[in-house]
Amino acid sequence: MALHVLPIIMAGGSGTRLWPLSRALYPKQFLALSGDQTLFQQATQRLMALASDDVHVAPPCIVGNEEHRFMVLDQLRELGIEPGAVLLEPSGRNTAPALTLAALFAQQASINEDADPILIVTPADQTVMQPEAFKLALRQAVAAAADGSIVTLGIVPDRPETGFGYIRATGDGSVKAVAAFVEKPNLEVAKRYLVEGGYFWNSGMFVLRASTWLKALQQHRPDIDTATRAAWDERSTDAGFIRPGKAAFNAIPSESIDYAVMEPATAAAAVMEPATAAAAGHAGSISMVPLDAGWSDLGAWDAVWQVSAQDANGNARCGDVLIENSTGTLVHATSRLVSAIGLDNIVIVETPDAVLVADRAQTQDVKLIVNALQKAKRSEGSLHRQVHRPWGWYDSIDHGARFQVKRIMVKPGASLSLQMHHHRAEHWIVVSGTAEVTNGDTVSLLTENQSTYIPLGTTHRLRNPGTIPLEIIEMQSGSYLGEDDIVRFDDTYGRQ
């Protein structure tokens, strides 16, 4: 009998340690940091590739942030994948509530006529350099989880690493027993783990049935179980998105899968007799499959350097980059030529509105810069200069006192909301494509090099009726140019 599997992609992270490329409203999982596809796309395809005659893989369930919902759909559409569900968290409550929502969805959806599918839970922001080795380990984990066990993937360490939690596992087979989950060690302890053996990095990937997770959560954290079920019962659905009740969800205790279930379950199993553990329905039994597949969580720029192609001097580059007389250096350029001379073990990351220069050994501390930006309420902590919207994007290319210039791209068939502004007028010039412009009571078509003027207080809308992207230059002028000076009358995407 074929096993029924439901991929669960956890896509709600913020990736602050990869600033300035990763930002709160465009985090690292939606960036192509390793290869041509984004990390989210890579994670999705890795799980979908598990399908075979004896494993049926259902369309993926994505758990993510409300702000990223259209990026999720766009990137899945590029892969030709229709999601089984997109569950939107109104706030970050960590991974335990996120997995609980997915498990409740799985039981309700009866995936492939199976009301209790095997869930493969993975973060969306990791990379794997050896997909076939990953698939083999995952098939072993799925087989082990079919009987109701909780299975995790443990990364075979290749260096003493202080940035990861560890798993201590016992046994000689391909599926090992988990003895303990261990906190991030200091360097000396990490070196000892490597010498002793039996310790693996905690990947944050789990394989288990939906009922197994819910039973374990009820046993170890009934408060999270009860609160998440309350939010699920108040869910609403619109445009293919499932939204749990906002107030109820915000009241859920914030906790990770590890702290909520894995650590207490392992501790409980350590003092239980085997027969008692079996009677508990495996809620206290956790297994581990070793994974040696070129895995990285790309948690900081040093990790990006490690998985990047390097020259004979250990330098890695991306974009328009020149490097001379340097070693062990990463230079990532997105909008201009960046050159480096005489650098050792340095990271340089350039974006149109921010540049990071850091010692490669201290890139974990980039989050301190992000914290400072947030404290100063600077937009560079959360937004790029180019801001993505469900209809396309806009790039703020210049601004000054009482004016702002934007480059706007509208996808074929897409449109902005029907809106007006209290404090600014706008001039639009079509660069390429065809624009359908609503300007007050008039609707007209504009093509390349044609323009229009939208007076202050006039209702207007921009739509792309064509089959190629529409690009325009928009010049705003007025006393206030903030994005919150928008009154929407009608919006395709349900925004207010």
Image: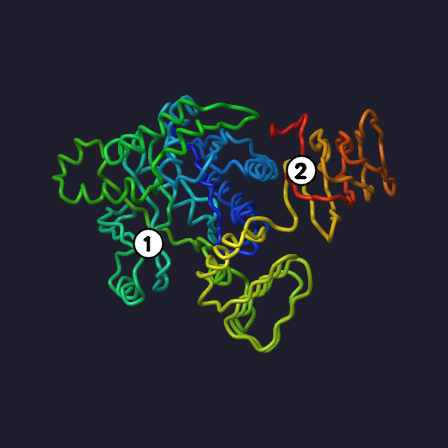
Amino acid at the residue labelled 1: Gly
Task: Count neighbours of disc 2 (C-alpha within 10 A) and say few if under 14, some if 14 to 19, many if 20 or more.
Answer: some
Seen in the picture, residue 200 relative to 79 is either above or below; the reply is below
Say whether disc 1 or disc 2 marks the residue closer to the N-terminus: 1
Q: Residue at x 85, y 35 (%)?
A: 446
Image location (x, y in percent) of residue 47: 46, 40
Front residue of 380/226: it is 380
How many numbered marks appear? Answer: 2
Front residue of 450/281: it is 450
Q: Going by the image, does 444 lie left or right of 283?
A: right
Amino acid at the residue labelled 2: Asp
Residue 165 is marked as: 1
Front residue of 382/300: it is 382
Find the residue positioned furthest to the front.
479
Q: Residue at x 27, y 50 (%)?
A: 181
Residue 485 is marked as: 2
